[in-house]
Image (cartoon, rainbow, N blue to C red):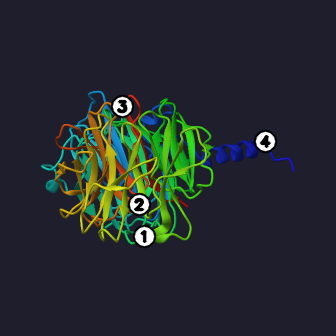
Amino acid sequence: MKLPMIFAILLSSSLLMAQPNPIGIFQHRADIGNPAIKGATSYNVNTQSYQLKGGGYNIWFSRDEFHYAWRKVNGDFILTANVKLLGTGKDAHRKIGWMVRAGEHEEAAHMSAVVHGDGLTVLQWRRSKGAPMRDPRDQLLAKKKNAEIIQLERIGKTFIMRVADPGEPLQEVGRTDSIDMPDQALAGLFICSHDPNVSEEGMAWNVRIEKTVPDTFNGYRDGILASRLETMNVFDGKRIIIQEDAGRLEAPNWMPDGKKLLFNKGGLLYTIPVEGGVPQQLSTGFANRNNNDHVISFDGKMLGISHHRSGMPAGGSTVYYLPLSGGEPKIVTDSTPSYLHGWSVDGKEVVYTALRVTKSPAYNIYKKNINGGPEVPLTTHTTGLADGPEYAPDGKYIYYNANHSGSMQIWRMKPDGSAQEQVTTDEYNNWFPHISPDGKWIVILSFPLTVDPGDHPFYKRVLLRLMPASGGTPKVIAYLYGGQGTINTPSWSPDSKRIAFVSNSGEFK
């Protein structure tokens, strides 16, 4: 049937208006409330950063005007980003941040984590459609100003705002559960000029939307969340996602040529270019149940793995080695469970954590020559767990994590097991110390104290932290939803500037 021309034009226009306008991780970008000066969002594919422009009289009273880039989200989630307003700005109350919104209507209920032009960093909300805006400003002004990292989390009906400056842990600055928000809502970045005759600009990077699971969720028993394989410059904190997968990617190693990463998935090992691309399987012969304990020797010639043998105690994790180019593995230790974590600098020995009930009812650290001979215990604790042993590049120390002092902390010892000393003492459970190739830095994975100090589970709110190898206070370099599989193995780039790691998220329906 042939439609009348005017009807066809109107229908075409209506369909065009209804189509999504995706950009980056967001499904839509549009002005809310019909501001006089229209806004825009652009996305830099190389840096994975966003630039926002927008006008609008305000986000206040009973209606809003602003520019918004958003996607639909459902259930519980965490929104995290570095944000910055550009230029000097005209109005001190120009604003940028995260917003969770009940809909596109200008009067919609919403929850906003906001940074203002004058530095005010605050949680603001409209409880229901057309209701007046609220904020607990009097409680928060003294806590934080000019924050760069903004996080907004939803847990059921509760919304929590956390903020930090680079290098700091996140601190909570706002919380409320008094808002009319449907299970599926809009979530995204916004900008508002606070002056209808002005356009302001801002930018955001390290933008992550992560769907969470309850703390009772067990990643071994209850299912698998999607994975992001990421790299990051540890000195400026900028992160790049190079691969996303609905399955479980884990524990990337940086290959010696600096051009590829090695990671495990589904019991197999794969390589992928650091810029992203199609993963290629690395042959490990009969070893098809490899876990996230794979380590490259210092000379770049050999690969150590932990493969699970069937019918063996405690899952049968066994240490092997093979050429880095692939091949048939050779067994190192027949005793299980044994979890590989490091090579000696000369490539003659491996260090691993193991449970040997006949010697001690605890996990301790051992070393063994790859060509045979007895395994040598380096720690002899009778309780708790010692894990993650890794040689410093100069061979003078083995760094590891242990919880026999109460919480899980980073320790070091000489290669013969002597001179054991604690390196970190803080309010986190710290795991897997990885020393940069130049020997100057250590990256660690930090869990909150709410996690059992003997456990490093999947799908938790964790931190990556950087500290000088010579000692000092660790600083935060990344805020993640992850844990097990994030950074179990050495993952520094050969130039000691970047690391690779894995973060996780559920899927949004």
Q: Quadrant of residue 217?
A: bottom left
Q: Which residue, given by chain and number where applicable, does mark 3 sit on?
A: 497
The amino acid on which the numbered mark 1 sits, given as a three-letter code, is: Phe
Q: Which residue, given by chain and number where applicable, does mark 2 sit on?
A: 459
Which quarter shows the C terminus?
Answer: bottom right
The amino acid on which the numbered mark 4 sits, given as a three-letter code, is: Met
Residue 158, x across and y down, in percent:
33, 66
Q: Which residue, given by chain and number where applicable, does mark 4 sit on?
A: 5
Residue 216, x across and y down, in percent:
39, 72
Q: Badge 4: how crowded within 10 Å, few (<14), some, or many (20+)? A: few
Q: Are marks 1 and 2 in contact (CB under 8 Å)?
A: yes
Q: Which residue, given by chain and number where applicable, does mark 1 sit on?
A: 217
Closer to us: mark 1 or mark 4? Answer: 1
The amino acid on which the numbered mark 2 sits, given as a three-letter code, is: Tyr
The amino acid on which the numbered mark 3 sits, given as a three-letter code, is: Lys
Q: Are marks 3 and 2 in contact (CB under 8 Å)?
A: no
Taking the image as shown, residue 90 lies to the left or right of residue 71, namely left
Give the mark, 1 or 2, whose residue is nearer the N terminus: 1
Closer to us: mark 4 or mark 2? Answer: 2
Give the mark, 1 or 4, whose residue is nearer the N terminus: 4
